[in-house]
Amino acid sequence: MTTKKVYMLELYMKKYGFTQADMAKILHKSECNFTNKLNGRTKFFADEMLAIRNAINERAAANGDPALTTDEIFLLI
């Protein structure tokens, strides 16, 4: 039995109310393209990681939470 690896990104998306469609829009990609990235079929590029980090940190700041690093968001668990 294999275990699916999950990016912390998925947890932060849920915490801050982002959908896959929201993230796709932030990246100017299709929802299918973002889903492939999230599932590990294709890789995230550095500029995409930064755009996602910035969007998450905007919501984190609005909630009074500390800013997250790119490494924290894209950690595989």
Image: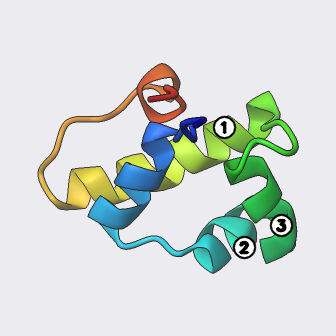
- Point out residue 64 in the picture as x, y percentages from the top left corner: 12, 51
SS under mark 3: loop
Label number found at residue 49: 1
CA distance separating discs 3 and 2: 5 Å
Q: Is residue 29 visible?
A: no
17 on left or right of 46: left
Residue identifier under label 3: 28
The residue shown at (77%, 61%) is 34
In the picture shown, does residue 46 fall above or below 62?
above
Question: In the rendered structure, which amino acid carries the disc numbered 3?
Answer: His
Question: In the rendered structure, which amino acid carries the disc numbered 1?
Answer: Met
SS under mark 1: helix
In the picture shown, does residue 66 fall above or below 20?
above
Label number found at residue 25: 2
For the C terminus, give its image quadrant: top left
Q: Do the residues bearing badges 3 and 2 touch, measured as CB atoms within 8 Å? A: yes
- Point out residue 61 in the picture as x, y percentages from the top left corner: 24, 51
Going from N to C along the chain, the mark reached first, 3 or 1, is 3
Residue that protrudes farthest toward the top in the picture: 71
Question: In the rendered structure, which amino acid carries the disc numbered 2?
Answer: Lys
